Image: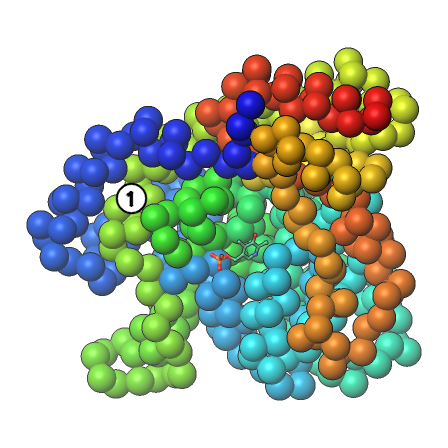
Amino acid sequence: MNIPLLDLKAQYQSIQQEINQKILEVASSQKFILGSEVESLEKEIAAYSETRFATGVSSGSDALIVSLMAFDVGEGDAVITTPFTFFATAGAVARLKARPVFCDIDKTGCNLSPEKLEELLEDQSKEHQSLKIRAIIPVHLYGQCADMTPIMNLARKHDLFVIEDAAQAIGAEYPSFSGTKKACAMGDFGVLSFFPSKNLGAFGDGGMVLTNDDSLAQKIKLLRVHGSRDKYFYEILGGNFRLDALQAAILRVKLKHLESWQQKRIEKASYYDGIFKESGLGEEGKIQIPVSLHKDKGIKNYHVYHQYVIRAEKRDRLKEFLKEKGVATAIYYPLPLHLQKCFSYLGYKEGDFPVAEEAAREVLALPIYPELTSDQQEFIVSSIQSFYKG
Ligand SMILES: *Cc1c(COP(=O)(O)O)cnc(C)c1O
């Protein structure tokens, strides 16, 4: 049985007519830069994410950069984030000449640990104290929100701003002290990516910056067009960070289906949980199913399962075995960011973030997408069982 990690062709087939019609509409209009499709998408995504403002930008990576630029982050500044994320989270900080300061994760959700964050912020002896810590970027990895209540409390106490990296977690909900909050609605900014494989994916690159703050939203809109309010007059230094009208038009079609796709992902994840429990692999210590930290707290999208990630003994051999069976899997991420060559100048070494390093050795993402069938899921789990039976 051939099972891809993600089947975007199946998704396209289900909405082909709507999408094609929309593409033709944009082609007929010949209006490609910003305009009404982008503005409508911004309003719709702000409503979906329960924030006041949203600004479409060129990618998730650029959404991070432009958010940091809005706070004038640069040389002499430091930004705290997790070493267990996609490269862009820390890459954005370094590209602005600020220093990424890593903080280990919690084993359960693989997200920034509030306890470790507190230790880091209270520890005056650390080298980075000569720099000015400006911000925290928690990442909602795999589609589950980081523990935002303690993170926001620490940020307020230390006067830091917060950018939620929600590239993998559009629509994920978090049970905060002030009621249920959506990803992107808790920090000063929330950033989304519309990379094709994300839960809401474009036909190319795209991203968005969300906020509840009017003046911050205006600043992002300015930065997106080279810092110019009136054409050919530049107030601040920005760049070309625009989202294409064509991408916005496609995303608006897909957005109408997003909530039903999210629910299907959650159903598939529960089905995996159930058949893994029946398999006994967990009790034998061979694998661990993903932990849903915010489940059973009366919220629907406690985890939007951008990825369904297990921990596995002999992970690399299991991955090879599944490949031979036709099952695609992936490792997000094989090397934590503090050990990446391009960050060697930061001076970190192996052992600095043991929880992230352990995760990098054990995680394995299994196929999950709305069109995945229960037969396919059963095949995947029984293949994993046969691997461990040897
Ligand atoms: C995908 C992703 C990004 C970057 O988004 P692009 O649109 O690919 O630039 C940033 N952070 C995380 C956690 C991501 O998964």
Q: Nearer the viewer, residue 180 or 332?
A: 332
Relative to residue 354, is residue 276 depicted above or below?
Answer: above
The colour scheme used to paint the residues is: rainbow
Q: Residue 151, image x and y in percent?
A: 72, 54
Res. 181 image quadrant: top right
What amino acid type should be assigned to the residue bearing mark 1? Answer: Ile
Q: Nearer the viewer, residue 70 or 339?
A: 339
Disc 1: which residue: 250
Q: Residues within 10 Å of mark 1 (few under 14, many from 20)?
A: many
Quadrant into which the N terminus falls: top right
- The answer to whether residue 277 of the structure is visible from this angle is yes
Left or right of residue 127, residue 263 in this image: left
- The answer to whether residue 296 of the structure is visible from this angle is no
Q: Residue at x 66, y 56 (%)?
A: 85
Q: Residue 33, image x and y in percent?
A: 22, 62
| Dot 1: element | helix
Res. 156 image quadrant: bottom right
How many numbered dots are placed on residues in this image? Answer: 1
